[in-house]
Amino acid sequence: MPPKDTEFAQGAASGDRRHESLHKLRSGELSLDEYLDERVEQAVARLAGRVDSARLESIRELLREEVRTDPVLVEMVRQATGRTPETRA
């Protein structure tokens, strides 16, 4: 287990990336899908190297589907970005 200061630094860096991604979305540099892809990647980053690639891809797909279909998550995305994720058929 890494020392607490390392965990704090990693958390701070992750927070910086979240804000940077949101800024890029709002400025038009990223589409909503690209923003959500970045957020999913940030969410699964700790799993890289711990689970096999097929499982990791399944987790990514599950997270993206949840963001598109879970009413609470859809609302959170709308509040954060001003947009709602599109539901894919």
Image (cartoon, grey):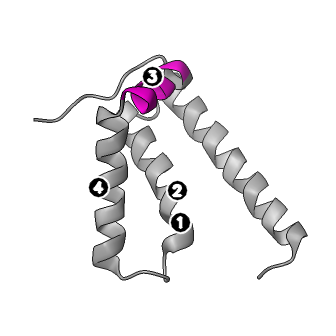
Q: CA distance from mark 2 to mark 1?
A: 6 Å
Q: Is residue 31 visible?
A: no
Would residue 78 be found to the left or right of residue 17 on screen? left
Left or right of residue 60: residue 29? right
Contact check, label 1 and label 4, Cβ < 8 Å = no
Residue that numbered label 4 is attached to: 61
Q: Which residues are magenta?
A: 71-79
- Given residues 61 and 82, the one toward you in this image is 61
| Residue 83 point in image, percent of width and height | 41, 19
Tell me whether circle 3 and circle 2 mark residues in contact (CB < 8 Å).
no
Quadrant occupied by the N terminus: bottom right
Mark with earlier residue (3, 2): 2
Residue type at mark 2 is Ala
**Amino acid at circle 4:** Glu
The mark that comes first in sequence, 2 or 4, is 2
> Above or below — where is 37 with respect to 45?
above
Label drawn at residue 13: none
What's the CA distance linking mark 3 and mark 1? 24 Å
Q: Is residue 65 magenta?
A: no
How far apart marks 3 and 4 lie (CA) works out to: 19 Å
User: Left or right: 50 with respect to 9?
Assistant: left
Residue 43 bears which disc, if any?
2
Residue under numbered circle 1: 45
Q: Mark 3 or 1 closer to N-term?
A: 1
* Residue 89 location, quadrant: top left
- Quarter of the view holding residue 57: bottom left
Residue behind mark 3: 75
Residue 53 seen by the camera: yes
Label 3 crowd (10 A; few <14 / some 14-19 / many >=20): some
Query: Badges 2 and 1: C-beta atoms under 8 Å apart?
Result: yes
For the stretch drawn in magenta, what is the main secondary structure?
helix
Residue 18, how many percent across, how many down? 62, 43
